[in-house]
Image: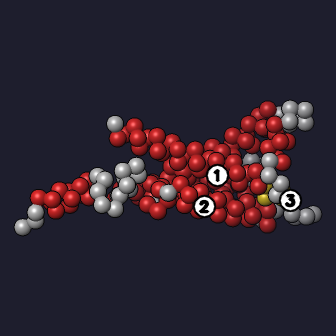
């Protein structure tokens, strides 16, 4: 027969309560149908994102000339913040806010689907690698350019989604 403390610890683990092996501040890992739904959502969203990055928004492949890239941090952001350069306000907002918002779902979904990504450092590292891969592919396939400012904005988007997840988790605990 199990002791009272063994039964309590066992029931705590089944309910997803903080116990051995789970930090108090981490979201509960979804299981079963909820996990399948989140995974499907992540896959569909990723497919849409790849479409937007490589084919959408009237993109065309540039087969001639050198690869297009910007490795100078804040160069593109300065361009969009300079009000005298003739770039329209909607173009500025789409570029700056769009690059942030479009990656926010990853900050929400990845930690829910992968326990190891509850760590903000791991999440940033994995996300940055994926974003660097996509930006490089965009340049190599000539469907766009590699822009280091886009990488920073995309990572900021992941962090904003992660922050939202943490806020939702704290509110749910109350």
Using residue 78 as the reference point, say whether residue 65 is left or right of it: right
Residue 68 badge:
3
The residue that label 1 is drawn on is 155
Measuring from the top left, give residue 43's x and y in whole percent.
Answer: 53, 58
Q: Earlier in the sequence, mark 1 or mark 3?
A: 3
Cα separation between marks 1 and 2: 9 Å
Q: Earlier in the sequence, mark 1 or mark 2?
A: 2
Residues packed near mark 2 inside 10 Å, few (<14), some (14 to 19) or many (20 plus): some
Measuring from the top left, give residue 124's x and y in whole percent.
Answer: 59, 57
Measuring from the top left, give residue 140's x and y in whole percent.
Answer: 79, 66
- For the question of whether residue 144 can be seen, the reply is no
Using residue 48 as the reference point, say whether residue 115 is left or right of it: left
Q: Look at the numbered discs 1 and 3 and tell me whether their residues touch, using CB distance below 8 Å.
A: no
Where disc 1 sits, the SS reads helix
Q: Say if 130 sits above or below 102 in the image.
A: below
- Determine the residue positioned at 78% across, 55% down: 147
Closer to the camera: disc 2 or disc 3?
Answer: 2
Between 92 and 1, which is closer to the camera in this rendering?
Answer: 1
Measuring from the top left, give residue 101's x and y in whole percent.
Answer: 63, 43
Q: Say if 84 sits above or below 166 in the image.
A: above
Q: Which quadrant holds residue 67?
A: bottom right
Residue 105 badge:
none
The quadrant of the rendering that contains the N terminus is bottom left
The quadrant of the rendering that contains the C terminus is top left
Using residue 73 as the reference point, say whether residue 37 is left or right of it: left
Cα separation between marks 2 and 3: 25 Å
Residue 125 badge:
2
- Determine the residue positioned at 10% across, 63% down: 3
Residues packed near mark 1 inside 10 Å, few (<14), some (14 to 19) or many (20 plus): many
């Amino acid at each position: 027969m199990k002791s009272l403390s063994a039964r309590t610890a066992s029931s705590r683990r089944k309910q997803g309560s903080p116990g051995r092996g789970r930090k108090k501040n981490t979201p509960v890992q979804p299981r079963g149908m909820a996990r399948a739904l989140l995974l499907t959502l992540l896959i569909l969203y990723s497919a849409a994102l790849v479409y937007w990055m490589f084919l959408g928004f009237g993109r065309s492949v540039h087969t001639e000339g050198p690869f297009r890239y910007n490795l100078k941090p804040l160069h593109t952001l300065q361009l969009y913040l300079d009000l005298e350069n003739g770039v329209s306000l909607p173009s500025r907002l789409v570029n700056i806010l769009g690059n942030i918002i479009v990656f926010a779902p990853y900050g929400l979904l990845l930690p829910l689907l992968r326990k190891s990504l509850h760590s903000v450092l791991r999440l940033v590292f994995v996300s940055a690698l994926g974003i660097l891969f996509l930006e490089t592919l965009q340049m190599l396939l000539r469907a766009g350019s590699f822009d280091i400012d886009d990488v920073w904005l995309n990572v900021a988007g992941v962090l904003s989604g992660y922050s939202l997840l943490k806020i939702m988790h704290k509110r749910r605990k109350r």
